[in-house]
Image (spheres, coloured by chain):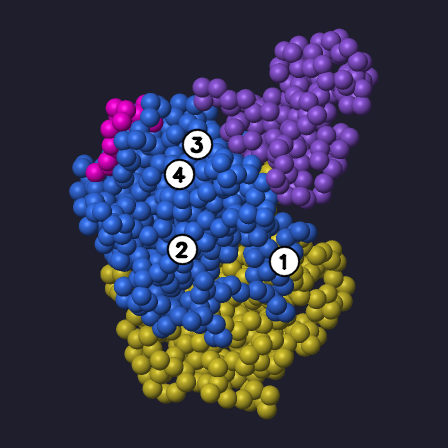
Chain colours: A blue, B yellow, C purple
Amino acid sequence: MPNYILPDFEVERRDDRCIRCRVCERQCANEVHSYDEENDVMLADELKCVGCHRCVALCPTRALKIVKYSGTFRENANWSNQSILEIYKQAESGGVLLSSMGTPNPYPVYFDKILINASQVTNPSIDPLREPMETRVFLGKRPQNIERDETGKLNNNLPPQLELSVPIMFSAMSYGSISYNAHESLARAATELGIYYNTGEGGLHEDFYKYGPNTIVQVASGRFGVHKGYLDVAAAIEIKMGQGAKPGIGGHLPGEKITEDVSRARMIPVGTDAISPAPHHDIYSIEDLRQLVYSLKEATEYKKPVIVKVAAVHNIAAIASGIARSGADIIAIDGFRGGTGAAPTRIRDNVGIPIELALASVDKRLRDEGIRGNVSLVVAGSIRNSADVVKAIALGADACYIGTAALIALGCHLCRTCHLGKCNWGIATQRPDLVKRLNPEIGYKRLVNLVTAWQHEIKELLGGMGINSIEALRGNRLMLRGVGLNEKELEILGIKHAGE
Amino acid sequence: MKLVEGRVRIPSGCAISGIISRDRRKFTGERIVESMKVMRERSNGLGGGFAAYGIYPKYKDSYALHIFYNDSNAKRECEAFLNEHFEIDEASELPTRKIPEITDEPLIWRYFALPRPSRLAASQLDEREYTARCVFAINARIDGAYVFSSGKNMGVFKAVGYPEDVGRFYMLDEYEGYMFIGHGRYPTNTPGWWGGAHPFSLLDFAVVHNGEISSYDANRRFIEMFGYRCALMTDTEVITYILDYLIRHVGLTLEESASVIAAPFWSSIAKKPPEERERLTYLRTMFPSLLVTGPFSIIFCFEGGMMALNDRLKLRSMVTAEKGDMVYVASEECAIRAVEPDAENLRYPSGGEPVIVTLNGGKDNA
Amino acid sequence: MKRVYVNEKWCLGCRLCEYNCAFANSGEKDMVKALKGKKIYPRIRVDEHDGITFAVSCRHCEDPICVKSCIAGALSKEGDGMVKLDRTKCVGCLTCVLVCPYGAVVQDERGAALKCELCLTNTAGYPACVKGCPNAAIVYEERD
């Protein structure tokens, strides 16, 4: 059978620097490197290389470089190498192409076409090193009216809120798609930072119950791991209606990743594929969603906010309006560029809309209907840095979820082969010898560093705009200008063009 | 083409001043004009205005509507609307004095009006909300007509010009009231339109403001959910609507409203006694989008008194003083000394600390 | 006294500790120059069995058996607690290798004894195995 599949990468080794330490060989789960004892030379089988850079990072003399495979088909603007290779794979396997992480396709990144304001002359900028600069936010429902007692004192009639020290949380990533150590890193970092992490649809390992006050538990269509204790220990409950990377379908965790621990957390047998159904089979309409929201609130005595997470699709504004009226406290919208442990390639690359546009239209619609103040909005789907966070808040979000960014902080190199279960960084795998590679002592500190650094940057950006509390940035679209956007895009985003 | 208020956002530096007699003793508008005159350097002649309270004792129960008209068509259309919705006791041109410093004036008319009982009953609104909505309707829908004052027994007088000239133009020396505020503008663009000058007023609330708020669009996009239209794109307009919403619709007191728009920092809240801490946390969590950031110095007037407030970082000047039952608030001490040389208890209020002055024997809330 | 401790929970068996140790004690500034084409004699050794990997180095025992066993007087215990090896005195009898209960003493390129001395006297200045461990499996700290 001729070999149609080309390698993605070439492994370049500078032999003058290689000291034959064989660390690359020991650390590559894909068995790319090997040592030829007879000739005292290191060999590399580039076909197996996924470009995860584990060997590059660990080589003590920096002798390794992973480059794009230079062999190519005849140049073709329509039939890219990728398109051709995908057909070969499907002709061989007859299967649906699977991919991991967010779509790499060159769709427009609206965050990169939006610019932020700064104050000058007429309104002073504020120095965050010397003046208070507040990034604290509360997420939750607001009541319609105030209430006073007989003496005229204001009653606290606020339903339960989530308090965040900075408007960033860790996005839902299930135990099973990522490792125990990755979860531990996220949970510890969220606790230290005063924010929250999300269990994803894999249930909650009992070892992590102690981080409950900083945990958002997810109730997804497969209802994996959902029981009373699970709900009671959490700070909030998120109903996962959809995910940005794969709108319209449920999660998929291959049987190899269902180990003893994962099976216990999910409440399913070891080794079976965990396939979440596409819809919740008890939610076929908005009124059904309302029923589930209130069931969860009843089950937890109305002590915890309920979040509804949806994928950003074409009629997201109407959907969000419905959710806002369904009793949900917080709406989470996941844009099409969001990450995933495994999704059919075609769905990941072609379904959904960008979070920037979804956010702008949802925020506008809720304001047009006069209900924006009743719920909080959290957005996700490729928030890559603190400027993206600031832009998202100025467009109207209350807070952002970060998923891919958090994993990159833990060591992910975006090789996008999570679905193979051999993550060399110990993140997207259940193999104990690989999971070992992510030491939560190191991992959680890196996450704390990342969010702390972003918080400082957010303060600098706020100060530059003359704002000293982040509430005053929410929906403040006059602080943004577009560049290189057409009329329609500017109109949907609700911002002016730079120069106006 | 002249840049008209509402098309672009015009930041400005300014001067403000306020005088109130707590015993409701009447004095003429000359004092406020004198007070503003001394702060001439803070304006650039592109806007000035005043609000006066207690000036229409004969019609004190009617809404005194002051309206600008670009032309007689606008006047005709507006009067038709007014006649439909109100019973008009008196309609006349607002008396003005022709002076060379004030030019290009529109038609300026005044109507003493009360909502038509049958229409009021049919609307199922209270009198104030009814009047407010009529004002919004005229300003939004009748081209060339602009209602710039709509309170009872009070009136706003504003124009493009230096405040002291505006005061002379409107013959403020011939009005007697118990409370006056004044404003002089220093916009960085050229407005062409009188309606955009300050004070901004709705019903009996009038606001003068010096500053430029950085939270403008966050505040505007929130307050517009409740039927307000920020047509002028000025800070004063949005601040007035915020206070109108908090006081008239939500039912907060003046102090509570100040704790919303100039909420203390979390670090300050943490140091307060438990009950106060809970109250402030509640207010800040309930109304986060009504927090106003950026420099501001406002005098907010209502029929029963006034509130002066600075932003939390105190980025604009404000000084208060008193003499007997008279209380003075201004951007500069000289503006107070100009009309009350022996003023006492001179104070510079802290950032975020509201100074509330109410009429003696009156209710302490708006 | 601070010692080098290994947590087998995090040891990946990658052997970077061995190569960093050899480099630190080579006296060279460049790792390639120090180690290329040469057999390494690290003072920390990764031991592997049944899926468990663990790096072994001198424990600087309270009551060192190796010191008692040394016929040449090359091994001694310093006041601060470090067990020191004078390589000029060692005669290569390897008794210390036999008696060390941890297997922490190894052979150098001459066949004589060699062991970890916490990088206190070489160019590294700080234990190179600790610094170079990619998973924080090796730490340098004081424990009672």
Q: To which quarter of the image does residue A74 belong?
A: bottom left
How many numbered circles are shown?
4
C-alpha gap between disc 3 and disc 4: 11 Å
A341 vs B358: above or below: above
Q: Is residue B9 magenta?
A: no
SS for callout 3: helix
* Residue A69, numbered label: 2
Q: Is residue C6 above or below residue B152?
A: above
Q: Position of residue A264 (x, y in %)?
A: 32, 23
Q: Measure the alpha-carbon separation of dots 3 and 2.
A: 26 Å
Q: Is residue C14 visible?
A: yes
Residue under numbered circle 1: A126
Query: Which mark sits nearer the N-terminus, 3 or 4?
Result: 4
Q: Nearer the viewer, mark 1 or mark 4?
A: 4
Q: Please tell me whether mark 3 or mark 4 is closer to you in this view.
A: 4
Mark 1: give few (<14), some (14-19) or many (20+) Cα within 10 Å: many
Q: Position of residue B65 (x, y in %)?
A: 42, 73
Label 3 vs 2, first from the N-terminus: 2
Q: For mark 4, what is the residue?
A: A30
